[in-house]
Structure formats: C-alpha cells, structure tokens
Amino acid sequence: MKKEMDCIFHNEWDQKDEIIKEAFYEMSGQINASDLLKRQIDRRLQKEEKKEEHSMKHFSIKKVVIGVVAASFLLGTAVLAGSGIKYYVAIGTEFPKYTKFEDIGKAEAEIGYKVDAVESFSNGYKMTGIDIIENSIQNEAGQKEEEQKEIRLSYGKEGDEEIAFYARKLFSGENEETVYGPVVDKTLQCGKTKVIFTQYTYKSVPPEYELTAEDKKNMEDEHFTISYGTSEVKMNQYYSALWVKDGMVYSLGGFNLSMSGDEMLNMAKEIIENGSR
Amino acid sequence: MEELRLVQQLKGGNKEAFDALYENYKNILLRMAYLVCGNMDDAEDIVQETFVKCYLHIGELKKAEGFKSWLFQILYRTAYRQTKRRGREIPNEDIGMQAEATDGITSLDRIVRTETEKMVYNAVQGLDVKHRAAIVMYYYNEMSAKEIAKVLECTQGTVKSRLHNAKKKLKESLEIEEEGGKIYEKRDGLYFS
C-alpha cells in the first residue's frame, strides 16, 4: 500500500487512474522471462570474463594489489620466480571489518601472523578501518596452488584523500626482485629495508572498451595500466610505496593524492621504524 | 535480509547469488522494460543488458540496501539509450500486434480488458520515454516520487512535474478515446463500456 504522503495524486485518484493501473498489470502480467534469456545472459558473462582474463594478463602482481583498492575482486598475473603464468586472485570487501586500531590484534589473529602498523602518521593521516583480503595463487586451470590472508588498513584525513596500507607474507617463489619489479621512480633506504616509490597512470574503462592506438603505445610503459570494469573512462594517478621486510610484503597506496613521493616514502619510514608493537 | 546477503555475496563474485537475484527480478524487469519500450524484442535486449551490467559493475554499488534502485536505474538508462538509438520511441506496429494477440478467450471480460489495454497502451506510448518511465514506475511499480527520483537521477520536483504532465496527457488521450464512443465504468473489478 502506498503511503498517502508519497502518493502525489492520491487525493485526485480517480477511475482513470484505476484503468491505467489495471491495464498495466493486465498487459504485462502474462510476460515471463524465457530460459533463452538466461542462457543469453550467461553466454555474455562468460565472454566478458574471458575478455577480462585476457586483458589482465598485462598486470603484474604489484598492480593487482593496487586494484584491490577500487574493486572487490581482481585477477592478474603473478610474477613468480621459476614458474609459469599463474593468476593472482585477491578478494576483499567494501566495508571495513574493524574500525578501531586496538582491534588490529583480532585481525592479526584472523590472518595468523603479526604485521608492522601504526595508528596515525605525522602528516595527519589516521586509521579509519581494518579488513582482511583473501589472496590466492591459481594455475591456468583455476586451481588454487597457494592461499593466504592479507591485512588492509585504510587511512584518511580531511579532504577525502584515502590511503590504503597492505601487509602480507611472500608467496613461494616471490622475492624482493619479483615484488619490486622494473618500475621505480624513487627509493628510500631505512636501515636494511629498501622502500620504492612508483606513480602509475591507471586508466579505468568499461568492459566493452576498445583500446586506442594511443593506449597500446602507452601500455608499453610499465607506468601505464588499463583496468576494465567501470561505467565510464576515467584517468587516475596511483601512488605506491612498497617494501619487503622479514618475509613480508608491505605497501602503501592511494589514488589522485596531493602528496609527493617523498611524503609517501616518509610514511613508509614511520611504519618501518615505529610499526612493531 | 535474504536480498542483502545475496547482494553481498554477488559483490564477492558469487555467481549463484547472481542467479538467485536474477530469478527474483527477471519478470519484474522484463515487464517494466516492455511497458517502457513497447515491444518484447527490445524489452529482452534491455533486460539482458541490465543483468550483464549488474554482474560486471556490482562492485560500484556502495550500499547493498540500494540494490533495487540501482538495478532499476541501470534498466532505465539502458532503455533510454535503446529508444534513442533506435530513433523511435513508439514501436506502434509491435504494440498493436501485442494488444491484438488473442489466446482463444472470447469472454466479455477478456474482450473488454483487451480494448482497455489497447487504449491505455496507445496513450502511454504517446508519451516520451522520460515521462513513460515515470508513469510505469508510478502505476506499475507503485513507487513514491522519492523512489522514482532516485532511479531517474533527478529531483522529486522533476518527477512530480513529469507525472503531472504525463497524467494530464494520458487522461486527455483517454477522454478522446471515450468521445469515440466508449465510456468505461468499473463494476465488480471489471471495466464495462
């Protein structure tokens, strides 16, 4: 039953309104979706998934981690020493599981190991949420060969800029060389730990998007990445700081930030120096 | 609650959750699309596109509670683009065929209803797609101005204005039809001339 206040013409509801309403129900009441419609939809989805899988072969494991910021799940190609093509699958959630820093112990209990982390940074960023990402390495047949849980902490400050911090264990076959990759804009040495900073151009496009000649040329540069799945074409700049310490991979990342690479590297330094609890 | 759970599962990439949501919404979306675009072929294309977009873009839905409005929004946008692309908003020939199709029932009830449907349908299809979508959601889905505004991505004032104009045109069309010799009176849930 409609609420009277919502029914715009409720007071004027007359015989013609009844005629229209009844006619709508009569006209459409016998229409039912056919089995063929569902089969067509499933075929379309299979095609789209194949297209996405193909396009994601351009991703490195590092860029996949980047994508988790914006999507609930993503596929990519893992770069593992001494192995063929494997797919890196990360499944996260949109909403944080914990919102207080003191709950980090609960999150660590869930993932099964402790991580370096801080509640806030000297530049004003404060923790806003903690959640868990399910990671796995899958072979080309889609079978899981290795899986682990990763922790993600979100940080924010005035102006709506957000930074995500990830911490996970190295997969078998991963090492500093494969994690860092060939694209490095700046580095910072913190004791024995090397932190690298890279700025990527991240072009989000709809699933049906056809690559332009300029896109293909840009993709030759490892700084440039195409991501399928958005409703419109959008260019984003992604800032990433990455380091490997004690068998763990740590990274900080955020889209379209106003901070410099040096500022992000200093945030990484604060985690390395003050993050052990 | 069940729908919320399914939407959350779909956001995690669960195809079975998608299938369950499809079952829940397939007929309502197909009927809405049919009422808005006026023929079954286009309606099926619109619904197919809507569900594919739903599956591929579910990650962009911020709150699971808003799933229904979001899904209707995709349907409306798709229908809007479809009618614009086809360059025809009133597929009259299809409407006529649909309305005249009989299933062998020759009772007075069926005949009168078919006449009523034809008359209303012709009047509704005389509206542009924006007004038609508002009218369908208002009468068929029994949605409030606030809910329609969310789907059409406009203000409640715009919705009220569109409904006011659409209803005016619709009733004028019905009056013209009536002047042609048919005055409808509702008795026992049926319309008799």
Image (cartoon, coloured by chain):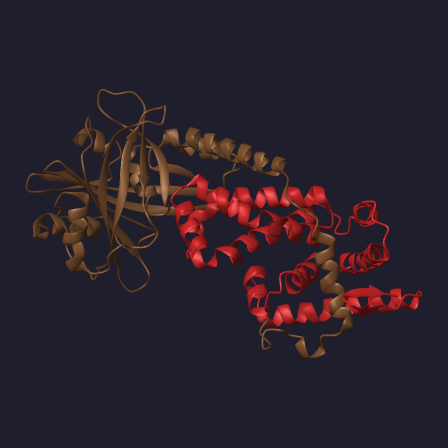
Chain colours: A brown, B red
Please tell me how many numbered marks the rendered image carries: 0
Residue lying furthest left: A191
Task: Name above or below for residue B193 compared with residue A5.
Answer: above
State the image coordinates of residue A82 (x, y, percent, origin top left). Answer: 22, 20
State the image coordinates of residue B77 (x, y, percent, origin top left). Answer: 60, 52
Residue lying furthest right: B181
Out of B102 and A141, give the one closest to the viewer.
B102
Say if residue A121 shows up in the picture. Answer: no
Image quarter for residue A227?
top left
**Quadrant where the N terminus of chain B lies?**
bottom left
Residue at figure coordinates x 39%, y 32% from the top left: A56
Task: Name above or below for residue A253 compared with residue B180.
Answer: above
State the image coordinates of residue B102 (x, y, percent, origin top left). Answer: 82, 46
Task: Name above or below for residue B166 compared with residue A201.
Answer: below
Q: Is residue B21 left or right of residue B141?
A: left
Residue at figure coordinates x 60%, y 65% from the top left: B143
Residue lying furthest bottom: A11
Image quarter for residue A81?
top left
Out of A208 and A187, give the one closest to the viewer.
A208
Residue at figure coordinates x 70%, y 58% from the top left: A25
Q: Is residue A243 left or right of residue B116?
A: left
Residue at figure coordinates x 43%, y 43% from the top left: A204
Say if residue A177 shows up in the picture. Answer: yes
**Quadrant where the C terminus of chain B lies?**
bottom right
Image quarter for residue A247?
top left
State the image coordinates of residue B114 (x, y, percent, origin top left). Answer: 82, 55
